[in-house]
Each structure stands twice: as structure tokens, then as C-alpha cells.
Image (cartoon, rainbow, N blue to C red):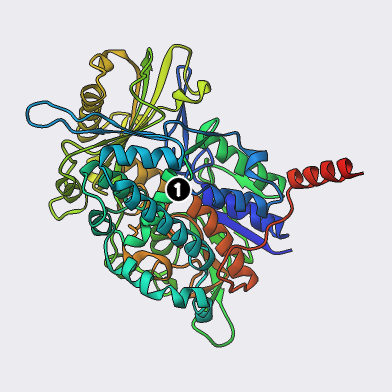
Amino acid sequence: MTRTVIIGAGVAGLATAALLAQEGHDVVVLEKNSRVGGRAGTLERDGFRFDTGPSWYLMPRVFEHFFGMLGTSAQEQLDLRFLDPAYRVFSEPDQHGRQREPLTVPLGADRVLQTFEATEPGSSAALRAHLASATRTTDLAERYFLYNPFTRLRSLLAGEVIRGLPTLTRLLASSLESYVGKRFDDPVLRQVLGYPAVFLGTDPSAAPAMYHLMSALDLDEGVQYPMGGFWHLVETLETLARSAGAQIVTDASVERIETAPRRGRGRRRHTVTGVTWRDAHGAEHLEKADIVVSGADLHHTETQLLPPRQRTFPQRWWDKRTSGPGAVIALLGVRGELPALPHHSLLFTTDWTANFDAIFGVDARVPDPASIYVCRPSATDPGVAPAGHENLFVLIPVPADESIGRGSLHGSPSTAVENAVDAAIDQIASWADVPDLRERIVVRESIGPADFAADYHSWHAGMLGPAHILRQSAMFRAQNASRKVEGLYYSGSTTAPGVGVPMCLISAELVLKRIRGDHSAGPLPTRVSSAARSADARVAGAER
């Protein structure tokens, strides 16, 4: 039996553990923190339960495929609810205090088309074409790019890819911002079609237009929410990993990856032999392994856990890369109802260029005002707040800069973090017309960029990982296997295919492909789920 050690029990680590344990590996997962989940964490305070990380359920087909790999389904594992409205957009008031009516994005493509048409006459036809293109691009991406380990050139030589090269070239050569700007005039509609770039860790002017595919995920397919939040998803992944036979050890900080010289020719002159880790009491342990998969931040893995000569991605490589944004996160428990805020809300500043320049520019600073995201899961899920109260998760994108400081979860928060939270509370109160919001807050906690660095070894204290600009996407992103050390693999948001929970699930499958020696471009075949078997049995019984 292959002994496999996985570093980190975040989404990618748990997903990799489940797949490899099912494959027959003897898997042990080592997590430095006292809980699993990584960035997809949880916090309980006075009857409130906050998700501290991901909150937008994107790319449902990826989740369905992953669960299918384990012989189950999203329907069996998650209680998914469609949100209506999908989200609401609040715009910045003008200099005279006048504010545009919030744009509410409904559930269902036909209703979305009507909303666009009412906002900008003639735009429904452009949106229909936009969504059709997004759907085609999503299909192409899933079959030839996202699940592709890029170990064989011929995987990109499929006739469909070659025929689509002119279109793909145009989508890669132009930015999402310019792509949308040529098709829509209304500034808020442009923002609706451009904001998914933030989910990819970049701004619309730097994201390739190919990422317009993200529009199909919420405007066409609708937005869903897993009851219990993303913490329930983490618990589900943990259960699946343990059920497959994986052992998970928390408070286990990996100190280094152990290797030995490798016989034979080739660039990989060493092979993994295990990892050395330290427990909560400071005692050191050696965990022997035939394979090591690091689901930890790739920069930390390469620059801290390996000696210089064994680094595929040394510091000089990182010095030429662009980080995604950092984040200040506010977790607010609020007395009374907040009907103006649906489950998801976006508060967009008028001058997006200035906003993104503040985050990604040379003169980086916390934007003021900021374009922020607000999640009110209590609009859908009564279990996340006491009766008569609301749960708010507020995300404020800021520069990836550790000096901005820590939040309140680990003691005294920095002035910069608390000022950003104060400004966001006042912004929500004003823009969403909740004038007494501050007085109604009964629980307040914050997370800052330095928390990401301390808790997750995040490169540049970023919340996501390397930004999805062209030279850091698809085959240009750091891939899932070491070129210097045999038996060392990588999963997670800092490696291929990229940031976000769905990408972490795919990265686990890419590791499985690498270990199997599978060079195929698309998703692997799934097992027949028990739900499908039950359905087949019912059909067969009815026919008899």
C-alpha cells in the first residue's frame, strides 16, 4: 500500500485525501491548525455561526463531478437552495447624495434578460449572446483546460480546440473589462459582468476576456447555497475522507519535507521519503511516505519546506509573480432584520479604476470608499443566527500587504483593520438605508491580511493566491507536481487550476491524474452514485 502524507486539511487537502484513500493509498493528513478547512473556516459567537471564508457557491458541475468521483452526489451530500434574488447591487451615491436604485439580479435567465433590458434598452440581445458565448467557453474549459495536467501537447490538439483557436486567441488577448465595455453601456451592468474577476484574484482590466465564462454561472444557471454554509461542505469533505480511510491529525505543523538522492537519470534527482512535523506540545515526529502532497500555500511549501536545490519554484520565481488581493473581513451579528440586504449583496464604487488601483497599483492602500461584498446567510439559513438576529459576512478587498495587520480574532486588532471595518459598516448603513446598523451590532469580529499570513502561510498575506492574469492561468500557472523531487505533488488555490473552492476540488483530481500517469484533458469518469442506483432500482421495480 502506498503511504501518502498530505500537508494541510483545507478543501484541497481533504479532497485529495478522499480521492487517494479511495484509490487505495494509506493516507495521513497533517494540519497545522486545531481545525480542518483552511480558509474555509468557521467561528461561533453567542449563538451566531459565521463562515470565515468562501460563501458563494460557484461552478456546481464541478462539485457534482467531484462527489461522483467518490460514488455519491451533491444531492446526497448537500442541501442546496437556489437564491431568489441571486444578489443585489448597490451603487455609490453621487456628490449630491443621490443614489441610483439598487439593481436586483433575479433567479432565472429569462428574468435576468428582462432586468438587463429594463436597465439598458437593447441590452438583452447582447446579454443573450454574451451568455451563449460564456456557456460555450465554460464547456470548452471544462473539457480541455481545467482538468488538464498539461503533460502532453496532444491534449490541446483536439479538433474543437483547434477550430476555436481564433476565438480563444481573441478572448485571451483582450481584457474582461474591454470585452464587456464593447457590448454594454450602462456602468452597473458592466460591473455585474466584470466583478467575477475579483473571484479570480484580479481586476477586470487585467483578467483575460476568457473569464467572461463566469457570467454563465450566476446569470444563466442561478446562484445556490448549501444549507449549513461552507463549513457544512468542509465537514462533508472531512467525513468522506475519513470514510475512505484517511487519518487526519490536527495541531500538526510540518517543519520540512524529507528527501533522499534518487538513482537514475532525469531532472528529478531526489525522491520524497516523508515529512518531519511538530505536535502541539513541541515534540517532533517523522512521518515516512512514498508520496507527499502539499495542500499548503505553494510559496511556503517551496521556500520553507524544501532545501534550495530541490525547489521548482524558488523565491526568484515568486518575485516575478502577481498576487491576488488581500482582505479585511468583518463578521457581524446584528439585532433585528435587514430586509434590504438579500443573501448576497455587492456595493460598487463609481470609480472602479481608482478602486482597483488602490488594491493592485504601485501606491497600494486600503480603498476609501471600497467596493465590498456582503453575505447575509441568515436570509436563507436560520441556523446561522439566533432568532430575531442577522448574520453578516463583509469582505473588503485590500492590498495583499501583511503590514495592514491582524483582526480581532487573535487579540488586539490593528488600527487599519478596524478603520476598514468601521468604514464598511457606515457604507452599508448609508447605501442600503440601514441608518441604525452600527447600534444594532451585538457581535463584531474581524480578520486582517496578517491573519492569512499567520494562519495559512499565505504568500504576501493574500486571501486567494496568485492572480488569474494571463501568464498565471491554465498551463502558465504553477502545475501540480515538483520538477525536482520525485513523489512530491501540489494541490490547492496556489497551484493549477487556480483559486476558489471548485478549483481546489479539481486540483485534487489533477494530483490523482499525475500519480496515475493519466494525461487526459477532461474530467475522469465517475462512479455510479448510490442515489443513481436507487433510482435505477425504482425504475426497474416499476417496469416489473
Q: Nearer the viewer, residue 202 or 296?
A: 202
Residue lying farthest to the left in this orientation: 96
Instruction: Report crowding for label 1: few under 14, some 14 to 19, many 20 or more residues within 10 A (C-alpha).
Output: many
Q: Quadrant of residue 170?
A: bottom left
Q: Where residue 300 appears, x then y in whole percent?
A: 40, 57
Q: Residue at x 25, y 50 (%)?
A: 184
Where is residue 431? Give x, y as percent. Answer: 22, 26
**Residue 452 visible:** yes
Residue carrying label 1: 217
| Residue 196 can be seen, yes or no | no
Tally of numbered discs: 1
Q: Nearer the viewer, residue 150 or 84?
A: 84
The spot of residue 215 in percent (x, y) is 39, 50
Identified by mark 1, the residue type is Leu
The residue sitting at the right extreme is 544
Is 20 left, or right, of 164 in this rendering?
right
Point 46% across, 56% down: residue: 135
Q: Is residue 50 above or below residue 279?
A: above
Q: Nearer the viewer, residue 348 or 516?
A: 348
In the rendered image, which quarter contains the N terminus?
Answer: bottom right
Whole-percent x and y of residue 495? 44, 61
Q: Which element type, helix, strand or loop, lies under badge 1?
A: helix
Quarter of the image with the C terminus is top right
Classify residue 477 by image quadrant.
bottom left
- Viewer-proximal residue, 483 or 106? 106
Q: Residue furthest bottom?
A: 265
Is 359 placed left or right of 6 in the picture? Answer: left
**Left or right position of 95 against 34:** left
Q: Is residue 490 above or below residue 331?
A: below
